[in-house]
Image (tube, rainbow, N blue to C red):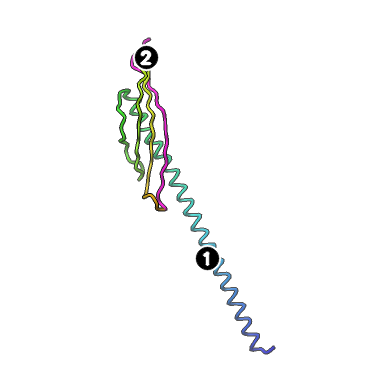
Amino acid sequence: MSRRRQRGSALLAALFLIVVVAALGLYAMRLGINQQQAASLQLLQFRAHAAANAGLEFWANRISNNNAVPCGTTAPAFEGFSLTVTCTRTDTGLAVVYELTCTARRGTYGTAEFVQREATRRVTTMGTGYWSR
């Protein structure tokens, strides 16, 4: 083999090695970005769950402080989440049972930043004359 032919094969091997190392670097970078996005989404899901529970706590507190509170859908916003509370009130004569459902939502549906969580709770309060019987 001639020296000229050997120099060309070394150049080809070096070029191949550079391409392989660059491809591995791009793969590692893409993998890191995907893991970061997954962690961010999981954090948003935990925050949405906390926001939904905060909405339930808000309404449970209102019900506990005032037994005659009407059911409504008003709840304060929580850390960028919009809260929607639905309530069903059932008066059994001895007790009043409230079925609460709170939905916490952030972002626009169909985008990567959209997250929604729902929490439910049942709150029972005794009637005013229950303890005097």
Q: Give the image quarter of residue 66.
A: top left
Q: Which residues lie in the magenta part? A: 112-133
Give me the residue at 37% from left, 46% from top: 106
Question: Which of the numbered marks, if any, corresponds to residue 26?
Answer: 1
Estimate how packed mark 2 is, as few (under 14), some (14 to 19) or many (20 or more) residues with alpha carbons within 10 Å: few
Dot 1 or dot 2: first in sequence order is 1
Residue 19 vertical position relative to residue 97 in the rendered view, above or below: below
**Coordinates of residue 68 in the picture (x, y in percent):** 30, 23
View extreme (top): residue: 133
Q: What residue would you read off at disc 2? A: 130
Give me the residue at 63% from left, 82% from top: 9
- Mark 1 touches mark 2? (CB < 8 Å): no
Quadrant occupied by the C terminus = top left
Q: Give the image quarter of residue 91.
A: top left
Give me the residue at 59% from left, 75% from top: 16
Q: Amino acid at mark 1?
A: Leu
Determine the secondary structure under disc 1.
helix
- Check if residue 79 falls in the magenta segment: no
